[in-house]
Image: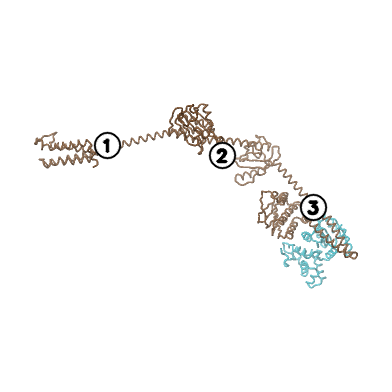
Chain colours: A brown, B cyan
Amino acid sequence: MKKLPVILRDGRFWILLLSFLLITFLHYAQLFLFSHPGESSLLGLQRHTVERIFFLAPIILGGVIFGLKGGLICLGLALAAMLPRVFLLSSYPRTALLETLIVCVAGVWASWWLESHRREVGQREQALLRLEAVRKELQSYIQSIRENEKRLSVLHSVTAAIGRLIAIDDILSAAADKIKEAINVDVVLVFLLDEGSGRLRLRTHRGVSNEFAQQVDGLRVGEGFNGWVVQTGEPCLIEDSTIDPRVAREIVRKEGMRSQYIVPLKSRERVVGTLCTASYSLKEFTTEEQELLKLIGAELGVAVEKAMLYEESQRMGRRFRELFERAHDAIWLHDFQGKILAVNRAALELTGYEPDELLGQRVSKFLTPKQLELAREVRRKLLSGEEIKQPYEQTLIRKDGTKVVVMVTTSLLTEEGMPPAFQNIMRDVTRERQLQENLRLYVRQITKAQEEERKRIARELHDDTIQALVVLSRRLDDLLSNKPRSSQKMLSQLEGIRSELDETLKRMRRFIQDLRPPTLEYLGLLPALRELVLQLNQQAGIESVFHVRGPERHFAPEDEVLIYRIVQEALRNVWKHSRARKAQIVIDFGQDKTRVMVEDDGRGFEFREDSGFVRVGKIGLAGMQERAGLLGGQLIVESSPGKGTKVVLEIPSGRLRD
Amino acid sequence: MVREGLRELIRREADMEVVGEAGDGEETVRLAMELKPDIVLMDIAMPGLNGIEATRQIKENLPHTCVLILTAYDNPEFIFAVIEAGAAGYLLKNIRGRELVNAIRTAHEGESVLHPAIAREIFARLRPPEERPHQEKLALLSERELQVLRLGAEGLSNKQIAAKLSLGSRTIQTHWRNIFNKLGVCSRTEAIVYCLRRGWLSLEEEGSERR
């Protein structure tokens, strides 16, 4: 019912009402105007039929105007208007009723048809509207796709242009040209940040005078728009430079730039420079253009960074090449087959060859089969990842046939894009080796001379001093046996001298024992060692045992002295320093080496293999090690505080005399 | 000088005579072979062949010659080595003249010239051989002789052995003489060493194998 005012305001409603009232009046006009004018006909239809058909008009009109509901209301009203005549006035009420009903049915049908027709039309219109909306949407999509495509193609052309290039300036030039072409600007400037000075260097410019270029080169971070962009890392838009109050530089105005857009060049979130675009006329930088420039800025930043790294690596490469060439150590590279790939000056000097005599040749050129075996062993271990002691000693044969002893460090080079190779760094130690050998020889001579001297003194003491003392004591015996001729006092004095003589002899024996144990000289190593162990038992009170394993073998006398001295020193340490209660001395005559082991349960000491014995004040151990070296063997010391000490001497079986 | 003193010392004894003197090992061996003396007095430290080797060579050729070592060294290893080489005794050079001639005489009689304690120690160190003793050889010695040997090895003197076995000391001396002849040695020390080395005699039941 709220619709009612709307309906009342509609003029068509009033027309409908008027036509309805007119037709109703006509329907009953016979009552008021004229008494039945008789049966006239119109188009072959009876007058009453026509009058009833007239009612279709308001019904249809109602249907047209107000839809099915309006039609039905009009139909109801028409029926109400027609029924009184049917029942009260008609002389043929039956026919009248039929006609009325037919008119009603026709009215209902007409109303329904109209309604459905109208609905159909409405639907069609809506569909058309929707279609139009979809079309518009589609068009806008296509538009944006085209724009994106354009941006992408610009970006792509920039990327493609810079991707092919390696040098920074080439990259920037190519990018500037592409940008100038793709985005309608007059000026393109690219600044790069110089990390060292903190200034912006103008690396590329398009569309500006040289004077301008000179003026803006070397901006500080934070100075000018470009400096600001570097500082903040944000893009900057200047709509009109001529009126922008931020423009402080006269040169910008003089150059006549108006609109500017500046983006940072970024690589991994770090600003490396700026890209500045400008035009001499007012130009609106669209959102798309701004986005595009930002993308190019990022792309360019990465490219610049890469190029910088490349330049750096090139520089490093040159520097390494220099280092390689000028190194004091000899360096050569060879591949898996032993083919020499590179040699430096020092390597040439070391081997005495010319470059073309070595490059492409095999390393076997200056290695004997035995040394080649060592080289192969190193190669095998390097490839299998086994540990090797580096540097190791190797001997090379020079061009003139002489030999050089070198300490070599070999490493496997596996660089991308390069065939794997072995790098050898060598230091000539021939002279050092010679000195070492001389020193060793000298030590050997000294040790030998020392032993000789000791032996000589011991001999002299035995053959001379002791004999003399024995003769003396024999004379005293004679005096003592002639009792009757001597006074009692004299006798006791002689007895005193005699026992003093005995003491002196004892001391002499000990002295000889220390100088050069006669046991070692006349009985050999084992009895001499047994004697040492006995001394440790009896004099030091350390419970010591001596074991011999394997069949007894013999060394040369001078070697036995060395072994004896080492054990003597070890036992002296046990005695003087270890505070041990028990000790064990074992000599083991093995197949390929003889091991002499001295082990105690004493307090031990802090010991590190790498620090030399002399440096840590273990002079005794240093002497033992030196002697072990003279034996061609080695001395192994194992000790830690509270854990006792174990000294092992290993002598290769090659030293055995039998 | 020492030799001079010794010569003088021995010359004074009525029952002894110096038949030869040598200055080194080789000469000693050669002279001993030539003269076949009862007793050889020998130093260890000699030029060339040392006293131990010389003793071994002399004993190989002249089993009935007694070698007495007279040396300046008192190392136990030496005592062991010379006894093993076949020496009958070991004397230090500063021994009194009287003791020396007594020792020579004792050695000649076949008695031990070693201090009993030292003798025991040495016998204890002599290890019997791996292989089993030769029974035939063992049968060489009588049961009584073996008893005498064993007691001797323990360091008992003839008198003590005689008392222990309720025999006269002369009888014991006769036993020793027989043992020496049978084994081809000249001193009781040698006889004991000889038997110990062949495993005919063992000191284990006396508990001397302590380590």
Query: Mark 1: which amino acid?
Result: Val
Residue at the spot 71% in from the left edge and 42% down from the top edge:
A432
Check disc 2 and report the residue beneath it.
A416
> Please, is residue A288 above or below residue B200 in the view?
above
Check disc 1 and report the residue beneath it.
A121
Q: Secondary structure at mark 1?
A: helix
Q: Chain of mark 2?
A: A
Q: Is residue A246 left or right of residue B134?
A: left
- Real-space CA distance between mark 1 and mark 3, rounded to the nearest whole angstrom: 140 Å
Give coordinates of residue A66: x percent, y percent. 23, 38
Q: A292 or A135: nearer the eye?
A: A292
Q: Secondary structure at mark 2?
A: loop
Give coordinates of residue A346: x percent, y percent. 66, 37
For label 1, count other residues whose C-alpha is less than 10 Å away and answer few (under 14), some (14-19) or many (20+): few
Quadrant where the image shows the N terminus of chain A: top left
- Tags 2 and 3 on a common chain: yes
Give coordinates of residue A488: x percent, y percent. 88, 65
Q: A178 or A445: nearer the eye?
A: A178
Query: Mark 2: which amino acid?
Result: Glu
Q: Is residue B22 left or right of residue A341?
A: right
- Tags 1 and 2 on a common chain: yes
Check disc 3 and report the residue beneath it.
A455
- Marks 2 and 3 in Cβ contact (< 8 Å): no
